[in-house]
Image (spheres, rainbow, N blue to C red):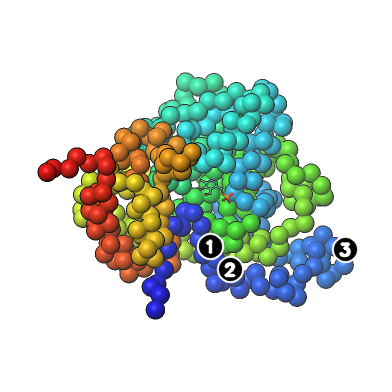
Amino acid sequence: MSKRQVYLDNNATTRVAPEVLEAMLPFFGEEYGNPSSIHRFGGHVRRYIEEAREQVADLLSASPSEIFFTSCGSESDNLALKGFYAVHGSRSRIITSAVEHPAVRNTAQFLQQKGASLIELEVDGEGMLSEDILDELPIDEHTIVSLMWANNETGVCFPIHELASKVKARGGYFHTDAVQAVGKIPVNLKETPVDLLALSGHKLHAPKGVAAVYVRKGVQVEPLIHGGHQEEGIRAGTENVPGIVGLGKACELAKRHIVEENTYVRKLRDRLERELLASCTGAKLNGAKQHRLPNTTNVSFEFIEGEAILLHLDENNISASSGSACTTGSLEPSHVLRAMGIPYTFAHSSTRFSFSRYNTEEDVDAVLAVMPKIVEKLRDLSPFVEKTA
Ligand code: PLP
């Protein structure tokens, strides 16, 4: 009999919640009309899109008219930054951090080639930015500061409220990639003055292929996709109705489960982290312990390749993720861990476990049952460890 799957890679993607799937099913079946149609068969589908917009807005404490549906978090980030650049042209100044997801980092670098000026902020050894990091930097009405709410690899959360407030006070614009934050920690846009925000369905138990961008009322961005009048002209194209309905339902559920993220999920994560650090030699936590998503832990095991750890975990039906990427045949530590200045022997071996509300104590038990042995075995094989005769 095959072993139970232990899925601890929820920052990569999440399972679709059963309630989400159920809400979507009619739109793959009898409700296939086009929401832009004049006839009632199609036209009446529009109200389900508007209901989903209200559900997303409600999770963010935003107005439904500020929510626009897109196809993925990357598109939302691109729309925010390229849409800003299209309005401000070569006067655009982009301030971002060295640990952003490529959806922001590569977009900012692309816009730099087009003529925007770009400042990339360094983080400290815990992957954190201080609240006053922007104080000495030039910020004006052509500046967009783009900083992630929570880091996908370490879970570290930047002080977005303080940073956004300072940028707004100086007349600049603030975008946040909140793809990892939404649904895991409270994101309240009544309290936190961001102008643009990206979120993605598949990170919060909605399906892949649907996402949203928040654009604060009055903030101007040009669309990436021109065409019909859908999404107020901000994002043309016939709507992904089942996906949008699913995203709405997932946001409604996320609001209901947010306390659980911070209690049940955090407790599982904390136990795994505590016991891994205690039972595996040479183990070290990456990222700030306090200001962190409740579902993420990123641990390095000195002298061992992260990839080898993942393969051994996979053999035990445990899915996790590593902070190394295979570039030109060699395993390079991720840009996030490099930016944090993590020594090579640790950065190389980082392993990320990311939880969801569907995980259980048994999942934690399963990892703890195998991990110390995997670490011991791989360390014995490591060419970096000096062997005593
Ligand atoms: N931003 C962050 C922080 C992410 O973790 C991801 C996906 O991993 C993205 C953006 C991109 O989202 P999507 O996969 O929906 O394009």
Is 46 displayed left or right of 176 in the figure?
right
The residue most toward the right is: 38
Whether tag 2 and tag 3 are in contact, CB under 8 A, the answer is no
Counting from the top left corner in percent of width and height, residue 332 is at: 42, 39
**Relative to residue 217, is residue 114 depicted above or below?**
above
**Relative to residue 235, is residue 373 depicted above or below?**
below
- Spatial CA span between label 2 and label 1: 8 Å
Counting from the top left corner in percent of width and height, residue 18 is at: 54, 72
| Label 3 crowd bin: few (<14), some (14–19), many (20+), radius 10 Å | few
Q: Nearer the viewer, mark 1 or mark 3?
A: 1
Residue indicated by mark 2: 20
Circle nearer the N terminus (2, 1): 2
- Spatial CA span between label 2 and label 3: 28 Å
The residue drawn where x is 38% and y is 56% is: 311
Q: Amino acid at mark 1?
A: His
Residue indicated by mark 1: 205
SS state under label 3:
loop
The residue closer to the viewer here, 114 or 50, is 114
The residue drawn where x is 76% and y is 63% is: 46
Circle nearer the N terminus (2, 3): 2
Whether tag 2 and tag 1 are in contact, CB under 8 A, the answer is yes
**Relative to residue 88, is residue 99 depicted above or below?**
below
SS state under label 1:
loop
Q: Quadrant of the C terminus?
A: top left
Using the image, tell me which numbered label, if any, was put on residue 38: 3
SS state under label 2:
helix
